[in-house]
Image: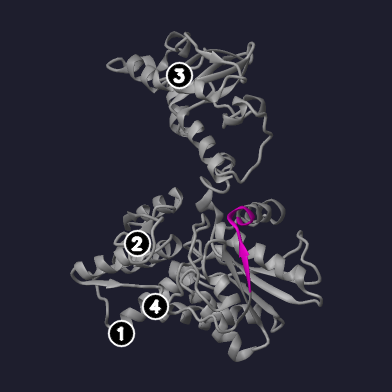
Amino acid sequence: MPDTKVLGLIGNTPIVEITRFDTGPCRLFVKLENHNPGGSIKDRIALSMIEAAEREGKIHPGTTLIEATAGNTGLALALVAAHKGYRLLLVIPDKMSQEKIFHLKALGAEVVMTRSDIGRGHPQYYQDLAEQLARETPDSFYVNQFANPGNPKAHEEGTGPEIWEQLEHQLDAVVCGVGSGGTLTGLSRFFGRVAPHVNMVLADPEGSVLADYIRTGTLGQAGSWLVEGIGEDFIPPICDLSRVREAYTIDDAESFATARAVLCKEGIMGGSSSGTLVAAALRYCRSRSQPERVVTLICDSGNKYLSKMYNDYWMIDQGFIKREQYGDLRDLITRRYTEGSVISLSPDDSLLTAYGRCKLYDISQLPVLEKGRIVGIIDESDLLLATYDREERFGEKVAAYMSTRLQTVPPSTPVEALLPIFENGRVAIVCEGDAFMGLITRIDLLNYLRRRVKS
């Protein structure tokens, strides 16, 4: 009888072929690690590391597990810890998506957030902080995926043999990223033993030091990147790069664009690191002069990135989606009315509807539109003043409580003219004649200024 427990579902993930991209003379396959019960490849190592610690007597009921993680290892540890009854404390950098944080807390993990803009040696660096907490916490175990031999072992004994059997012993290259280094190390060991002709290829985010190390043999200065889960500013202790022959550096823009394209073309919703891996694999395939069979990984589910790389507005704010530029205030409007993206109300909507839309879209003010013209605006203060001690007013119409004293500006208005509007506690309402174009808030202006610096 098959294992019907959740932890028994870890591994044996499917492999599918990428068929709607230009792969040159090669065939490209992806192993869908997002099919693991925790949604990522890290389920494998979490189970391996915890069960090894149990066998070795390092943990027991009541032990607190502590780990530093950029996301998926934490989720995987939380899944295993929940099933085995361990307390789990995770230290995570502040670039982690909200979906992952919500997921972690829902699984019962305790989360300590720390900075992502500092390196090793700083007391707030996530790995150093986790190690410190482990020293200070009685009856705790520092999992330390970066040096734990159970990490690569999970891939040497699980992921590698699965790939080899699924591709019927016909494989020429594996494209892999490095977070802790466990996946690449474990796969390198397996294929080095059973199929030494298989080429190990590194996919690395721009800003990470690893690709340059493969090319030059020296460690440079790390930069920053937004892709989660892979890339490093050092070589992790368990990371064996000796069998890597080629390395590709993929910037954030290409990673996100590739992940979104894989969803659109292939129907596979992977995370940001999956975009990096597929982008590198496509480059490798197109560089070949002879046919090869190449495999890479969909490391985790894109459901964890809906507020980031699958969110058009986040992509626009980060400068990864280029929109038509006008050279005026229209360039500052995040949600343009002409693009059908404005969240608005009609005068006949209720205050409850206004409240619901503010909460759903995480915005503090809404334009009130009638036949494409702005006739009012209502914000959180208006809602509060209307309903405090009079909750029945939630059923009344927006028209009775919206502000109709509107300060509109034409798109040709200089950017500096927005500051007095913001100082008066208002948003800029951009109109050309009677035609409403959109709102500009403080954060819209900040995003505009940051993009100018970035470019």
Q: Which numbered disc, 4 or 2, marks the residue closer to the eye?
A: 2
- Position of residue 355 measured from the top left corner of the image (x, y, whole percent): 42, 25
Residue type at numbered disc 4: Ala
Contact check, label 3 and label 4, Cβ < 8 Å: no
Left or right for 453, reference 351: right
Q: CA distance from mark 3 to mark 4?
A: 54 Å
- Position of residue 49 measured from the top left corner of the image (x, y, whole percent): 39, 76
Which residue bears the numbered disc 3? 421
Which residue bears the numbered disc 4? 147
Q: Quadrant of residue 75?
A: bottom left
The magenta stretch is 247-255
Observer-nearest of 424 and 264: 424
Secondary structure state at the residue bearing disc 3:
helix
* Quadrant the C terminus occupies: top right
- Position of residue 389 measured from the top left corner of the image (x, y, whole percent): 27, 16
253 in the magenta segment: yes
Left or right for 390, reference 410: left
Q: CA distance from mark 2 to mark 1?
A: 29 Å
Q: Which numbered disc, 2 or 1, marks the residue closer to the eye?
A: 2
Q: Residue at x 58, y 82 (%)?
A: 161
Secondary structure state at the residue bearing disc 2:
loop
In the displayed structure, would residue 281 be above or below residue 108? below
Q: Of the residues under marks 3 and 4, which one precedes in the sequence? A: 4
Secondary structure state at the residue bearing disc 1:
loop
- Mark 1, residues whose alpha carbon is within 10 Å: few (<14), some, or many (≥20)? few
Circle on res. 125: 2
Q: Which numbered disc, 1 or 3, marks the residue closer to the eye?
A: 3
Q: Which numbered disc, 3 or 4, marks the residue closer to the eye?
A: 3
Q: Of the residues under marks 4 and 2, which one precedes in the sequence? A: 2
Observer-nearest of 73 and 322: 322
Residue type at numbered disc 2: Tyr
